[in-house]
Every structure is written in C-alpha cells, then in structure tokens.
Image: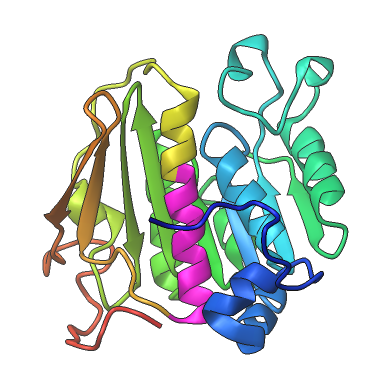
Amino acid sequence: MPAGDGNQEQVSEGRYARQEMIFGAAGQEALAAATVVIAGAGGLGSPAATYLAAAGVGRLVLVDFDTVALSNLNRQFLHGDADIGTPKVASAARRLRALNREIEVVPVGAKITEENVAAIVQGADAVVDALDSFAPRMVLNEAAVKGRIPLMHGAISGFYGQATTVLPGKSACLRCIFPSEPPKETFPALGPTAGVIGSIQAGEVIKYLTGGPLLTGRLLLWNGAEASCDVLPAPRDPACPVCGHLPVTTEETSR
C-alpha cells in the first residue's frame, strides 16, 4: 500500500524534494527551464495549471478570453466569489503566483483564433488543451502540429472524460482521432471529473519534460460514474489533413 503524505519521515525541506526522488535534480531543472501554454483557465485549466505551478514549471502562459461567472465555481477552483466578473486569466494568475513565487505566470486574455494561435504557442515546450469547444481546439491542434509542439488534450462531460497526448510526427493528432465536429451542446460539468482529467494532463507534461512513457497513440476514457477507465488505440491517419504529410516513424513515442 502506498505511503501517505504524513509527517512520519522528514526527507528534505526543499519544495521539490519528494518529486526529485522520482526524476532527480536534472528533471527538476528541465521543469524550471520549460514554458508551458495552458489554453483555458477553467475546469481543466485549474487542476492542470495548479499542479504544473506546484511542480515548478518555470513559465506558465495562461490563455483565456472569458470572465468568471457564478456557474464556473463548482469546478474552476482558481477562481472564487470575489472574482465574479473579472478576467479568468487575472484571478488564475494571482492564485498561481501565490502558490509558487519561484515561477513566472503570463496571463493572455484572448480567444484562440487562426490569426493569433501561432504567436501564442511560439516558444512553448508543451501545450495543454484545456478548452471546451471543438473549433478552437482544432486550431490549437493544427498550430501544435505545425510547430512540432507536444499537445496534452483533455475534455469532460459530466462524470466522463478523455485524455490523450499528441507528439507531432510520432502519434495521432486530434484531427486523426476526431475527424468531424460533434453537435454543439452545453455539456454538464463536474469538478471531480475535471480534476481527474486535468491532473492526467499535468502528469503528461511533467513526464514529457523529465522523460517517461506518454499517452500517445491511445485515448484514455474515464468513467467516473463507475470509477473505471478504458484506453483505446488511436492510430495516426495517413490521410489526415493536419498531420498526414509528416513522415511516418516507428520511434518510441516518448521524449
């Protein structure tokens, strides 16, 4: 049985001591040197950004155009009652800086579009897809593929969620997996589901930056109602209009 996080053992006083037991000082330095773009400061962005900030990722770029609404607060824990009506990136950045003063947090109050996406992801070591609609998600996917930037995807609906990691040229991109746009709908959203999927996304970023097997070529499906998980194969589509032109490689899909 895994040990708890109690105070029985004093390992070190360092902020990152427990995770350095996993990937060492070199891994921690890789996190500190990284820039990660988090597209969406809502239900998925809250856990993803929080765990990346706590882990010591050196520069987090938060992108969101929306303002905080009361209906967000059941799951978007980077915001509170006092933030209603204010930009999400502002309240999120404030809380992340309070969590870890060693990192840089850059708020970008913008909607992701074909015109601005290249500038938004430029210089990123990884991109977290914490968006909640199909069209901007595909714009982000295409920019990540063009820039050869890893993309950590997540989405939720009620008790159900999904996640995958895209390594351009090595694994399926989002257009391979989701070739057609689903019907538009207002989907139910539950905080614990967002917490599970956002945490998986953060873990994928950390593994990519420090070295480790990734959720590439596979789609993880989380069923919170049954507390079960399925992982389906998600192969590349050679006819994909976004990544089909990239050379096929059998290289291991981890960094």
User: Magenta segment, principal secondary structure?
Assistant: helix
Looking at the picture, does residue 168 appear above or below residue 220? Answer: below
Q: Quadrant of residue 66?
A: top right
Q: In the rendered view, does 18 fall on the left or right side of 81?
A: left
Range drawn in magenta: 198-211
Q: Residue furthest front?
A: 8
Q: Residue at x 59, y 52 (%)?
A: 38
Q: Residue at x 41, y 83 (%)?
A: 255
Q: Residue at x 45, y 81 (%)?
A: 211
The percent coordinates of residue 20 (x first, y second) are: 63, 77
Looking at the picture, does residue 33 appear above or below residue 95? Answer: below
Scheme of colours in the image: rainbow
Looking at the picture, does residue 81 appear above or below residue 147? Answer: above
The percent coordinates of residue 147 (x first, y second) are: 47, 73
Decide whether residue 231 is among the magenta residues: no
The percent coordinates of residue 81 (x first, y second) are: 78, 14
The percent coordinates of residue 143 (x first, y second) are: 46, 62
Q: Nearer the viewer, residue 254 or 132?
A: 254
Q: Nearer the viewer, residue 211 or 1?
A: 1
Quadrant housing the N terminus: bottom left
Q: Quadrant of residue 61?
A: bottom right
